[in-house]
Image (spheres, grey):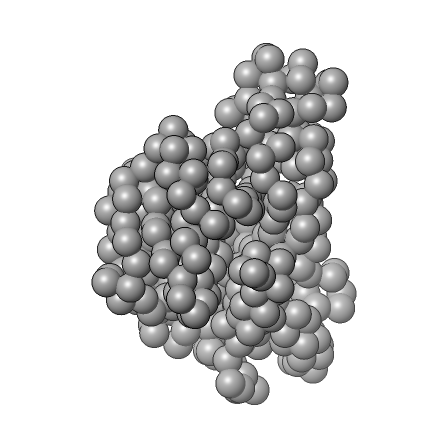
Amino acid sequence: MRIGLYDPHLATLGGGERYFLTILEEALGVQGAEVILLSPEEPDPAEWRRLGIEVEAGAFTWDRAMDREVTEASRELDLLVAMVNDVPPLSHARRSVAMVQFPHRSHMGARGGVLRALGVGRAPAALASYELFLCNSEFTRQHIRARLGVDAVIVAPPVDMPSSASGEREPLILSVGRFFSDWHSKNQHVLVEAFAALGAPGWSLVLAGGADDRAYVERVRRAADGLPVELRLDVPRDELLDLQSRAALFWHAAGYGQDPRRHPERLEHFGIATVEAMAHGAVPLVYPAGGSAELVDDGRTGRWWRTPAELAELTRALIADEPERARLAAAARAEAERFSTDRFRAAIHEVVLRA
């Protein structure tokens, strides 16, 4: 069995790549399978360890490819799995599966709008060559239907569950996300603004994530000057797990300040970092847009905030009410179990890697 896996943005190493590379791990476990990784960048499995992925470089074949080369390579494949943000490349594989992270309107021209209005999508031949579309959340599924005209099956991303979560928490607020200021910013500068208004002696804020945008990192660093705020850049996975095990609260701001009707792609599509924090026992306080509103049930598994001032107010209330923090943390841990990596691996075998 020849299995090809295509990711045009493999070097990004975000949540989508964790999803994609976990599928790669599972494909490598299929008896008798030959696995070909298709991507424009040469893969570096050593870097994948930051995502908790353990794959030897010699376990698969790599072919440099973009859409056109993927279409040609698919003729020799029994299964093609493509990770995309738009219409996937035309496939000739025996079976074809597309995981659509989010259908970005910016990638879709005027002709696409006309075809969508007719209900056939921008590229009917390419879309019709796939028997299955996957997505990460109900929020994404709805926009795939509206923008591409196809139905998708929700298989939420994999999240590793800790063996146990300590009941002892430090006066620490954690936020995790790549630092960048473009359309999908995690808005760390907004969190610094909220922390400046918090007024909670003894508490600190840690902002952990990849330093994708150095200018934005410096903007956040300047805003945090003089505050007990630490920027932890490109944190190794073991250090991130340590932070998650100690944090009492988790803040998330993706989507703040965006128009959800005009630019839904700028919201959080799922929220792996939020689920990881919940699994470790931190109470999440999230901006309720996109996937974040699905993950956190306000008042049951965490809290929703809509302005930095409200985030500070809700946080002060939780800091002062330890029993309430404990109640929300227990509910958050239980909710996170729905997104375990074991659950994801089982789902991938059932819907993607089946014979």
Q: Is residue 239 visible?
A: yes
Instruction: Residue at 32% x, 46% y: name it.
Output: 11
Give residue 339's position: percent from left, percent from top.
61, 67
Query: Where, quadrant-wise, is the C terminus in this rendering?
Result: bottom right
For residue 35, above or below residue 41: below
Give residue 76's position: percent from left, percent from top.
40, 43
With 22 as the anchor, is 111 left or right in this view?
A: right
Closest to the observer: 325 or 60?
Answer: 60
Q: Is residue 319 visible?
A: no
- Name the image quarter holding residue 57: bottom left
With 270 as the anchor, is 146 left or right in this view?
A: right
Closest to the observer: 71 or 346?
Answer: 71
Give residue 324's position: percent from left, percent from top.
71, 77
Query: Where, quadrant-wise, is the N terminus in this rendering?
Result: bottom left
- Name the image quarter holding residue 214: top left
For residue 122, above or below residue 179: above
Closest to the observer: 104 or 73?
Answer: 73
Task: Report the number of numbered marks.
Answer: 0
With 230 as the anchor, is 351 left or right in this view?
A: right
Closest to the observer: 291 or 28?
Answer: 28
Instruction: Residue at 43% x, 38% y: name it.
Output: 75
With 60 as the anchor, is 263 left or right in this view?
A: right
For residue 318, above or below residue 17: below
Give residue 113's position: percent from left, percent from top.
65, 17
Instruction: Residue at 68% x, 61% y: name it.
Output: 296
